[in-house]
Image: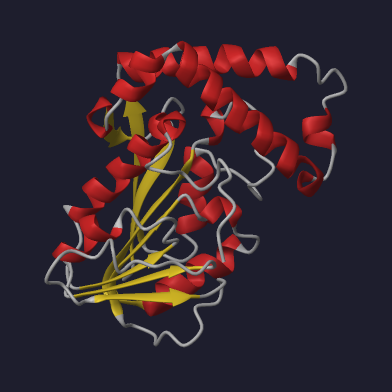
Amino acid sequence: MKILQTAERVSQKDHSDNYVFQRSLLAYIEAAKLISGKVLEIGTGSGYGVNIIAPHTDEFVTIDKYQADVSDEAPAGKSNVTFIQMNVPPLHGIPSGSFDFVITFQVIEHIQKDNIFLQEISRVLKSGGKLIVTTPNKKMSLTRNPWHVREYTVQELEQLLLTSFQKVQPLGVFGNEAIMDYYARNKAAVERITRFDVLNLQYRLPRRLLQIPYDILNRLNRKKLLNSNKELVTGITYEDYTIRAADDDCFDLFFIAEKA
C-alpha cells in the first residue's frame, strides 16, 4: 500500500521538507552515538534512519503501522534488520526484557494512550535499558496540529516519563541563525493564514475534521517557503541543529529515559 505523503511523514526527497527532515536526521545521528546491542525502533517512517542505526547494533528491529520496505536502506553486508508491521501499543509478541535500547522519534504525540505506550517500552527493555524519544516542543508550535493527539512541554514529558522510568535526561533540539530565520518566515506565513480563523476553529473543532485541510495548507506553505527562500531552505543541514539541556525555546524534545 502506498502511504499518503502527508506533511506528517517527512520525506528526504522533497526539498520543501528539508527544514524538518534535517532535524529528524539529527535525532538518528545523535542516537547512533548512544546505542548498542539489541535495538528496537517504534516508527520506521520512510526508513531513512535504518542505515544510520543498524551499523551500531547487534540486532535492529523497526516497527511501523504501515508496511515498509527497509531492505534498500539496510547497510551493505548487514543482515541484522527486521521490520514488523504493527499498531502500538501494545507491543504484541515482543518478549519482556529483550532490548538494550528503544528509539522512537516523532511518534508519541500520535499515541492516544501515551502512558500505556511508555509502560510497554519499559516492559521490553532490559534492566538498565534506555529509551530515546523525540517529540515537538509544544511551546514552539505555531498552530494546532490536528494529526497530534497532544503535544508536550519540557515539564509534561519529564513527568510522564518518570511514571515508567527511573531516570530522565531532558534534552532539546535547538537551531542556529539560519534555522531561526526559517522559523520566523514560517511563523509569519502561518499567521497570515490563521488570521482568517476569527472563531478560533482550529482549537474548537474535532481534530479529525481538520487533518486534511491542515495538511494541504501545511504542504502548500512549505512549498511556498521553498520557492521564495530556496537557498535558505535547501542549504539547511543537520549541523544547523544542536542538542543541549531542554528549555521552552527548543524545537523538539530529545529525552533519554533509563529503566532501573
Considering every residue shown, the one lying at the far right of the view is: 199
Tell me the quarter of the image containing the C terminus: bottom left
Q: Is residue 144 left or right of residue 234?
A: right
Residue in the foreground of this view, choosing between 234 and 100: 234
Residue placed furthest toward the left: 77
Residue in view at x 54 percent, y 45 percent: 156
Query: Looking at the image, can residue 132 be seen?
Result: yes
- 82 relative to 54 in the view: left or right: right
Relative depth, front residue between 167 and 172: 172
**172 w.r.t. 168: above or below:** above
Q: Position of residue 158 (x, y in %)?
A: 46, 49
**Scheme of image coloration:** secondary structure
- Which residue shows up at 43% across the image and 13% down it? 229
Q: Is residue 172 visible?
A: no
| Residue 23 location (% of width, % of height) | 35, 37
Quadrant position of residue 239: top left
- Above/below status of 151 relative to 178: below
* x then y, percent, for residue 146: 69, 42
Direction from residue 189 to residue 246 in the image, left or right? left
Q: Is residue 20 above or below residue 69?
A: above
Q: Quadrant of the N terminus?
A: bottom right
Q: Residue at x 44, y 34 (%)?
A: 17
Q: Disc count in the image? A: 0
Residue 98 spot, x, y in % from top left: 31, 82
Of residue 122 and residue 87, the one placed in the foreground of this image is 87
